[in-house]
Amino acid sequence: MRWCLTPLLFLPLLSHAQSARSGPRAGVGLATISAGQFLEWNGLPKVGPIAGWSFEVPWTEQASFLIEPMYMTKGSLIQNPTLRSWTSTRLGYLELPVLIKFSLQSDLGGIFLTGGAIGGYWINGRFKVKQDGSVLTDQKYTVTGSSNRTQVSVTAGMGWDIGTSAFEVRIQQSITPFSPVIRGQNLVVGLHYTYYLPKKKEKKDEEEID
């Protein structure tokens, strides 16, 4: 947990950089748990919220770094028509994406690509089974004391920047075992929106001293 939280202590400093911009980031994720194959979709999409904060620090004329602490829901939703049952798995994660954003044009705005790595920490979850509308199982995961709570993912995305706002479609796939037995991997397709707070204008100089 400490490795995930320590970088967050330094993130507020980025908002004071003259060239950086930051703002709230929100969206919705469509998740599944694959059987271990890369980008393998399994079942129906598990819909969940995405909420966090985005810091964008310029690197070159067209490239910048994105540091985006956020909360994200992962999991899966499986339907069994034969048994008329639904199995829902919800997994709540604190995540810290560190990405590179590359704009396809030199001036501000327009289409951009993103890619990088994400560190995740599992903080809550729920497992539910329903059959014919009746709840058979409804159980919260006990995460305290678990030795399998950290997760590393890789991600890539494409978006559109219009100055104060940015829209992005981002795909992320975990590359560390979710379970030492099942070896399932979390796959999420996220629809993201970021609102960048307007920068404060520099204060005018006080009256000149004669």
Image (tube, helix red, strand yellow):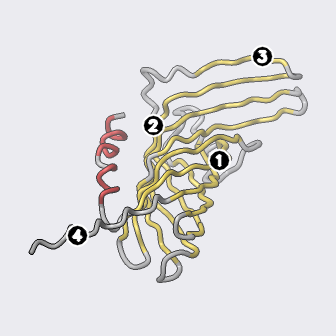
Disc number for residue 205:
4
Q: CA distance from mark 1 to mark 3?
A: 28 Å
- Residue type beneath disc 1: Val
Q: CA distance from mark 1 to mark 4?
A: 45 Å
Q: Residue furthest left?
A: 210
Q: Depth check: give the residue in front, 29 or 203.
A: 203
- Residue type beneath disc 2: Tyr
- Residue type beneath disc 4: Asp
Q: Mark 3 or mark 4, which has the lower sequence index?
A: 3
- Residue carrying label 3: 136
Position of residue 1 relative to residue 70, above or below, is above
Q: Position of residue 21 (x, y in %)?
A: 41, 62
Q: Callout 4: few (<14), some (14-19), or many (20+) C-alpha neighbours within 10 Å? A: few
Of badges 1 and 4, nearer the viewer stands 4
Q: Position of residue 34 (x, y in %)?
A: 65, 44
User: Pointers 1 and 4 in contact (CB under 8 A)?
Assistant: no
User: Pointers 2 and 1 in contact (CB under 8 A)?
Assistant: no
Q: Mark 2 or mark 1, which has the lower sequence index?
A: 1
Q: Depth check: give the residue in front, 129 or 14.
A: 14
- Residue carrying label 1: 28
